[in-house]
Amino acid sequence: MKRIVLLAFSCLAFAAATHGQSPTPAMTSTAVFAGGCFWCIQPAFDKTPGVVKTVVGYCGGTEANPTYKLVTSEKTKYRESIEITYDPAKISYDQLLEIYWRQIDPTQTDGQFTDIGPSYRAAIFYGNAKEKKTAEVSKEKLTRSGKFKKPVVTEILPAVKFWPAEDYHQKYYRENPEHFEAFEEGSGRVSFKKDKWGGQQ
């Protein structure tokens, strides 16, 4: 029986590898961040070793089954967000936060770049007391770095249910690369990141 189980696991691992995926680790954790347009914050995390998968969606509101139309109506408390499933043996929550800070303007209060409105405001949604403390320390570290002249105002909020966005929003940068690149450039996000962080992802 043990040999059959091991063989089955090996076959699954091989199948995952041949499709460009890594077998899901036995122990994973999740992190949820809001950073303006969710298309734009997904690529950096997808490229990060230790990240198992990412899903863009909505967090912060109370209505069930939110849609893009509802969220962008700015009549809810939802924010465009990303849920990151990661292997804590390979990357820490603190390291994810360091990547997150480099994707946003943490001094902007009314949205992110040219995306203005409550649904585009940045936030770190913590799942427990440890994540909250880590986020607070990380935010304070960024504040003390002197990198920004304005105050770092990104909110640190308790996590609520995360809802995946519609399929056409997932991996938008892969499915619609030309439109994505034009949008990202036009929003000012690319030039801001280069100015503040250079070539860092």
Image (spheres, rainbow, N blue to C red):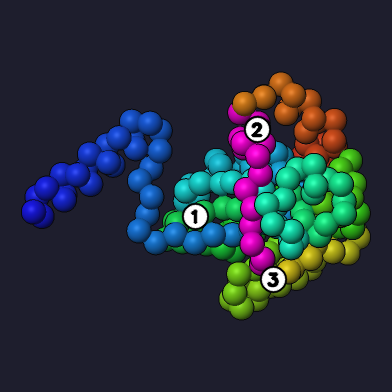
Q: What residue is shown with label 2? A: 168
Disc nearest the viewer among 3 and 2: 2
- Cα separation, mark 2 vs mark 1, equals 23 Å
Judging by the rendered image, the residue that carries numbered circle 3 is 158
| Residue at image location 38% in from the left, 50% down from the top | 24
Residue 77 is situated, as x and y percent measured from the top left of the image, at: 81, 60
Label 1 Cα neighbours within 10 Å, binned few <14 / some 14-19 / many ≥20: many
Residue at 67% over, 66% down: 160
Q: Residue furthest top?
A: 178
Q: Quadrant of residue 191?
A: top right
Number of residues whose C-alpha sits closer than 10 Å to that of mark 2, classed few (under 14), some (14–19) or many (20 or more): few
The CA distance from mark 1 to mark 3 is: 19 Å
In the picture of the structure, the residue carrying the numbered disc 1 is 86
* Amino acid found under the numbered disc labelled 2: Tyr
Asked if residue 129 shows in the view, the reply is yes
Which secondary structure lies at badge 2? helix
Q: Nearer the viewer, mark 1 or mark 3?
A: 3
Tell me the element at label 3. strand
Amino acid bearing label 1: Tyr
Label 1, secondary structure: give it: strand
Q: Magenta stretch: give its range.
A: 158-174
The residue that appears at 8% across and 54% down in the rendered structure is 1
User: Which comes sooner in the sequence, label 2 or label 1?
Assistant: 1
Residue 62 position, x and y percent, is 74, 63
